[in-house]
Structure formats: structure tokens, C-alpha cells
């Protein structure tokens, strides 16, 4: 799963509906950062 195509409204709805947890969103965000960091050296 990647969150890059989710809007903030999508994430809010998913949180509200119990489809995603804040922990899952945070983990995926950190994983995405780690994945692209070697290319962008942020």
C-alpha cells in the first residue's frame, strides 16, 4: 500500500471509517520517506 495518491480528505475518511489507523498512516509515510530518500537525499 502507498499513500501517495490519497488526498487528506481520503485519509480522514479512512481514519473515521476505521479502514486505516493513525499508526498505519505514520508507518507508511515513514516507509515512503525511507524508500525515496536515497534518490532525493532529503
Image (tube, rainbow, N blue to C red):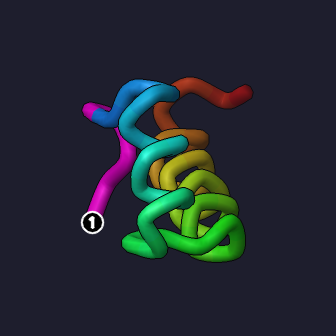
The quarter of the image holding the N terminus is bottom left
- Residue 41, magenta (yes or no): no
Figure check: 11 above or below 1: above
| Image coords of residue 37 (percent x, y) | 59, 41
- Number of labelled discs? 1
Q: Is residue 6 left or right of residue 9?
A: left
The crowd level at tag 1 (other Cα within 10 Å; few <14, some 14-19, many 20+) is few
Figure check: 20 above or below 30: below
Q: Nearer the viewer, residue 35 or 3?
A: 3
Circle 1 sits on which residue? 1
Magenta stretch, residue numbers: 1-5
| Image coords of residue 29 (percent x, y) | 59, 52
| Image coords of residue 25 (percent x, y) | 58, 61
**What main secondary structure does the magenta stretch of the protein show?**
loop
Figure check: 25 above or below 29: below
Figure check: 10 above or below 22: above
Amino acid at each position: 500500500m502507498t499513500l501517495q495518491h490519497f488526498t487528506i480528505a481520503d485519509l480522514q475518511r479512512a481514519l473515521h471509517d476505521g479502514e486505516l489507523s493513525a499508526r498505519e498512516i505514520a508507518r507508511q509515510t515513514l516507509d515512503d520517506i525511507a524508500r525515496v530518500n536515497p534518490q532525493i537525499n532529503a
